[in-house]
Image: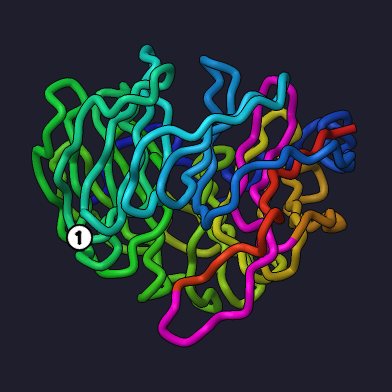
Amino acid sequence: MLPPFRSLLASTSALLSVLAAPAAMAASAAAAFTQMPAIQVPDDLWDFAQWDGEHHRLLVAHGKDVLVVDPATRAVRSIGQIQYAHAVLPLPGHDRILVTSKFDDSVRILDGSSGAEVNRIAVAKDPDATVLSADGHKAYVMAAKAGTISVVDLDSMVETGRIPLKTGLEVAVLASPTLLAVNTEDFNEIELVDLATNKPAGTIPLPGCEGPTGLAIGPNGLALSACANGKAALVDIAHRKVVRMLPIGMGPDTVIWDAAHHRFLVPCGESGSLSIIAMDKAGPHVLPAVATGPNARTAALDPATGRLYLPSARLNPVIKGQPKTVVSGNFRILALSPR
């Protein structure tokens, strides 16, 4: 049974009533982006990006390290020594950065100023996406191959438990302080976890959605799950069902809820575009896509300015048995500003 949560008890019709936003908000949602000058960064593969609002900087999980980018000065630092960085998160109240390290099954805690490694925490196999608890004292780490979630106590810096789910765990979000929702790429569904007990709390099938990766929670428990087959599923978390399927680009890996403009943003790497799904008076609808750059599949939003930052690079042709590589001198951070 789902944990009690007032805003998740509304009926589907009540949930959809949130889409009847004021006309001014609808106009805001339809605002286009302006492309700003890109920021050149060192070549390497990358994964998730995250905005650190407390320190006004962009963080990028960047192959063997973490990129710390100041968009105001365009200064770029590389910190840490990571065995393939997947997810990166700023820790609230500290100048510390959490990053998952794929090949040695660990979570690293880095000092954001010096770059020194503060701690290394063993977790389940293939740690990928990560989300913080509502109070910021725990991290939930999705172990994709192991099919479990590692629970990390950030005060004691130890793994305190593992929640068994299914393989292919991708992006997770807090649907409430005690309810976690996570995409499972291998099973085309959303898994639910009761964080009060650290036990599975059921699934939400995503028919028509192949390989869900990015996930974000919007108004009143409506979430958007990005799929590998050019679709996105708008999901009613409380009632465990898909409300609508919407078209997006190809190759998404992130979904962002832009609360100021009342819209979901979906960077699509294969299409080199940003899909925009407005949640306004007209109901959920797709706005014209915005051109981005090659392989720009993840992004981070600065909510204070509305600017979106997307790592992007062309990749060399894949050689069988060899890892992917970036075309020399091609990696940059794209910046889009709403207008």
Mark 1, residues whose alpha carbon is within 10 Å: few (<14), some, or many (≥20)?
many
Q: Position of residue 214 (x, y in %)?
A: 52, 56
Q: Is residue 295 magenta?
A: yes
Q: Position of residue 284 (x, y in %)?
A: 73, 53
Which amino acid type corresponds to the residue marked 1 in the rendered image?
Lys
Q: Is residue 252 above or below residue 217?
A: below
Residue at 62% x, 79% y is 317
Residue at 73% x, 38% y is 39
Under circle 1, the secondary element is loop
Give the residue pinned by disc 1. Answer: 125
Q: How many marks?
A: 1
Q: Position of residue 108 (x, y in %)?
A: 27, 37
Q: Is residue 293 above or below residue 156?
A: below
Q: Is residue 243 visible?
A: no
Indicate the quadrant containing the C terminus: top left, top right, bottom left or bottom right.
Answer: top right
Is 84 or 141 nearer to us in this picture? 84
